[in-house]
Image (cartoon, rainbow, N blue to C red):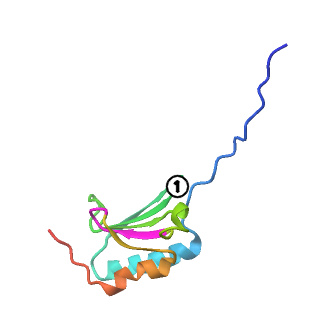
C-alpha cells in the first residue's frame, strides 16, 4: 500500500493591491502632476507583501516618486509611504490622504 501524505493548506495569501478608493485618490494626485508637467507615465506593482504605484517623469527612467502600501507596517509606522527618486522616505503614515499631502505642500523641481 502506497503512503499518502496529507495535503497541506495550499491556499496562497493574496497579493497586496490598492483598493478602488485608494486608486481614485492616487490617480487624482497623478493627474495634477501630469497637468503641472511633472509626470508623464506611471506603473503599478502588485507583490506578495506590498503594492507600488511609481510615477515617472519620462518613460525610460527610474520613478521620481513611489507610493507604497505595506499592510505589515500598519501598526508601526503606517501602511503608506511616499518615496523620492533615490528611495528616501518623503512621508509615511496610516492614512493615504495624509501621506499624499506631501505633493500639495511642496513644489517639486526635477534636478538634472
Indicate left or right for 110 with 79 as reference: left
- Residue 65 is one of the magenta-drawn residues: no
Which image quadrant: the C terminus? Answer: bottom left
Q: Quadrant of the N terminus?
A: top right
- Seen as rendered, the residue at the extreme top is 1
Q: Residue furthest left?
A: 112
Say which of 1 and 30 sits in front.
1
Residue farthest toward the right in the current orientation of the protein: 1
Q: Nearer the viewer, residue 5 or 111?
A: 5
Whether residue 83 is in magenta: the answer is yes
Image height check: is 45 above or below 64? above
Whether residue 90 sits left or right of residue 10 in the image: it is: left
Question: Residue 34 occupies which quadrant of the picture?
Answer: bottom left
Quarter where residue 84 is shown:
bottom left
Q: Residues within 10 Å of mark 1 (few under 14, many from 20)?
A: some
Q: Is residue 51 rendered to the left or right of residue 59?
A: right
- Vertical comparison of 5 with 53: above or below: above
User: x and y percent of residue 5 in the render?
Assistant: 76, 26
Q: Residue at image x 35%, y 85%?
A: 104
- In the image, the segment drawn in magenta is 80-87
Q: Identify the residue shown where x is 33% and y is 86%.
A: 105
Secondary structure found at label 1: loop
Residue 57 is situated, as x and y percent measured from the top left of the image, at 27, 68
Q: Please give the count of numbered marks on the rendered protein.
A: 1
Residue that protrudes farthest toward the front in the picture: 76
Residue indicated by mark 1: 49
Q: Position of residue 82 (x, y in %)?
A: 39, 70
- Residue found at x 53% / y 74%: 22
Amino acid at each position: 500500500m502506497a503512503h499518502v501524505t496529507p495535503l497541506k493548506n495550499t491556499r496562497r495569501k493574496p497579493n497586496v493591491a490598492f483598493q478602488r478608493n485608494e486608486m481614485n485618490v492616487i490617480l487624482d494626485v497623478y493627474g495634477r502632476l501630469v497637468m503641472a508637467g511633472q509626470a508623464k507615465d506611471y506603473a503599478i506593482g502588485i507583490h506578495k507583501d506590498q503594492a507600488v504605484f511609481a510615477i515617472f517623469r519620462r518613460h525610460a527612467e527610474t520613478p521620481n516618486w513611489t507610493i507604497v502600501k505595506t499592510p505589515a507596517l500598519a501598526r508601526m509606522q503606517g501602511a503608506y509611504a511616499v518615496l523620492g527618486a533615490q528611495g528616501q522616505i518623503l512621508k509615511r503614515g496610516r492614512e493615504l490622504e495624509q501621506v499624499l499631502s506631501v505633493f500639495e505642500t511642496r513644489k517639486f523641481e526635477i534636478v538634472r
